[in-house]
Image: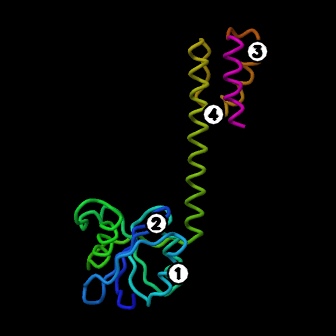
Amino acid sequence: MANVAVLGIDIAKNVFQLHGVGADGQVALRRRVMRDQLLQVTEAMPPCLIGIEACTGAFHWQRHFESQGHTVKIIAPQYVKPFLKGQKNDGNDAQAICIAVQQPHMRFVPKKSIIQQDIQGLHRARQRLVNHRVALISQMRGLLLERGVAIAKSASIAERTIPEIINNPKIDITELTRDIIGTLHAFLL
């Protein structure tokens, strides 16, 4: 492993495929490594250029490899694909990553710190909650509209008026509909 200058790693859940070449461009390493062994293998190598494909966990691995002294470049999958030789499999993917990372005009994914990833996670979670809330309100509005009860699109109005509607015995909707809408409304809280 001492002669590996560039290493392509195909990241997976449990088994990682490594493809390394020496400074002369000749294959110096082809190896499958289990997740719990990967850092031991890369730590035993002298500092080299490591290429990984942008995917879930890529920034995590980048931080670990860089702490071991390696230079890490993350490549978007669409830039790796042209370098794929043969059928798509882990070994060929690692080789394609290894080739792609060596290209002089390759575009790489910018690094993300843990804080940047946390903020991105916060935005994703918030967007999911907003989408969930909008979908629930739309479904309740639709159920009520099918029974002749129209309410405004506004989320705040819907949150306020839906309990009033389902608790008003003068509004002509069945008990089952009241229960369904009540259950859906409870998810908003």
Measured Cα–Cα span from mark 4 to mark 3: 20 Å
Relative image position of residue 79 (x, y in whole percent): 29, 65
Q: Is 188 on the left-hand or right-hand side of 77? A: right
Question: Reading the chain from its start, which is encountered first: label 1 or label 3?
Answer: 1
Q: Which residue does the image show at 47% across and 73% down from the upper left?
A: 111
Q: Are marks 2 and 1 in contact (CB under 8 Å)?
A: no
Please, what secondary structure does the residue beneath circle 1 have?
Answer: helix
Q: Are marks 1 and 3 in contact (CB under 8 Å)?
A: no
Measured Cα–Cα span from mark 2 to mark 1: 14 Å
Q: Which quadrant is the N terminus positioned in?
A: bottom left
In front: mark 2 or mark 3? 2
Measured Cα–Cα span from mark 2 to mark 4: 47 Å
Neighbourhood count class around disc 4 (C-alpha, 10 Å): few under 14, some 14–19, many 20 upward: few
Question: Reading the chain from its start, which is encountered first: label 2 or label 4?
Answer: 2
Measured Cα–Cα span from mark 1 to mark 3: 67 Å
The image quarter in which residue 80 lies: bottom left
Q: Which residue is mark 2?
A: 15
Q: Which amino acid type is shown beneath numbered disc 3? A: Asn
Q: Which residues are magenta?
A: 174-189
Relative image position of residue 73 (x, y in whole percent): 40, 76
Q: Which residue is mark 4?
A: 155
Name the dominant secondary structure of the magenta segment. helix
Q: Which quadrant is the C terminus positioned in?
A: top right
Measured Cα–Cα span from mark 2 to mark 3: 59 Å
Question: Reading the chain from its start, which is encountered first: label 1 or label 4?
Answer: 1
Relative image position of residue 161 (x, y in whole percent): 70, 24
Question: Reading the chain from its start, which is encountered first: label 4 or label 3?
Answer: 4
Please, what secondary structure does the residue beneath circle 3 have?
Answer: loop
Q: On screen, 141 above or below 59?
A: above
Q: Which residue is mark 1?
A: 40
Q: Which amino acid type is shown beneath numbered disc 2? A: Val
Neighbourhood count class around disc 1 (C-alpha, 10 Å): few under 14, some 14–19, many 20 upward: few
